[in-house]
Image (tube, rainbow, N blue to C red):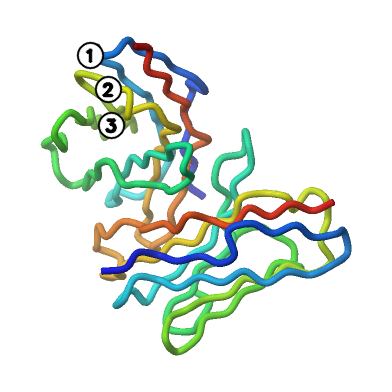
Amino acid sequence: KAGVTQTPRYLIKTRGQQVTLSCSPISGHRSVSWYQQTPGQGLQFLFEYFSETQRNKGNFPGRFSGRQFSNSRSEMNVSTLELGDSALYLCASSLDQGSRGNSPLHFGNGTRLTVT
Amino acid sequence: AQTVTQSQPEMSVQEAETVTLSCTYDTSESDYYLFWYKQPPSRQMILVIRQEAYKQQNATENRFSVNFQKAAKSFSLKISDSQLGDAAMYFCAYKSLGNQFYFGTGTSLTVIP
């Protein structure tokens, strides 16, 4: 079974631009989450999508948005990029078993975004 | 909101020795799940081990085991017979009943040959 695929692996953008990151989950996984990882901050939760609906949202400004398609693939968009948005963005999918399930997150290799 | 604390930013261990990574969490929930993830330099986060809060028995996966103390809200990871390939960043994670994951800030483990 193919793992979580994130594209592109690297991105270099200029401040003020916008960017779209893509994530294809493991086949059969309907939950997709996005995380921002920076040195010293660990993983900061952005949002989670399940069946095309945003189910959970972290504490990020409205410049960060996402969506999920009917095939469970997800995209994350960041508008008006700032220098502080430079980070590794990780996508993770899971086999959602409801609140009582112990299914873990399965992560992709991430997209390294650099804002200059 | 739940918080996860890893108080050891860096740890080192001699090859073949044992090391324990600490993790504490804060929650008002009685039922939840805990995980340890490993992130090598290749960047991909890999699941190491998981523990259900309702299970008293500590989880074990080969050389990896946990010490789960529910009352103390502690979830430490023990790595036995450490190998060079164990060198990585280790993250402790809490999964709430709302299906949301909370991660600690990580512990960077160095294995000394």
Q: Position of residue A82 (x, y in %)?
A: 83, 55
Q: Secondary structure at mark 3?
A: loop
Q: Which labelled disc corresponds to residue B83?
A: 2
Residue type at mark 2: give it. Answer: Gln
Where in the figure is residue B98, as x and y percent of width and height? Answer: 40, 63
Residue marked by disc 3:
B71
Distance of label 2 from label 3 (alpha carbons):
32 Å
Which quarter of the picture shows residue A3? Answer: bottom left
In contact (CB < 8 Å): disc 2 and disc 1: yes
Disc ID at residue B16: 1
| Dot 2: element | loop
First in sequence, mark 2 or 3: give its number.
Answer: 3
Q: Could you tell whether B60 is left or right of B20 in the image?
A: left
How crowded pointer 2 is (Cα within 10 Å; few <14, some 14-19, many 20+) is rated as: some
Q: Amino acid at mark 3?
A: Ala
Determine crowd level at label 3: few under 14, some 14-19, many 20+ residues with C-alpha closer than 10 A. few
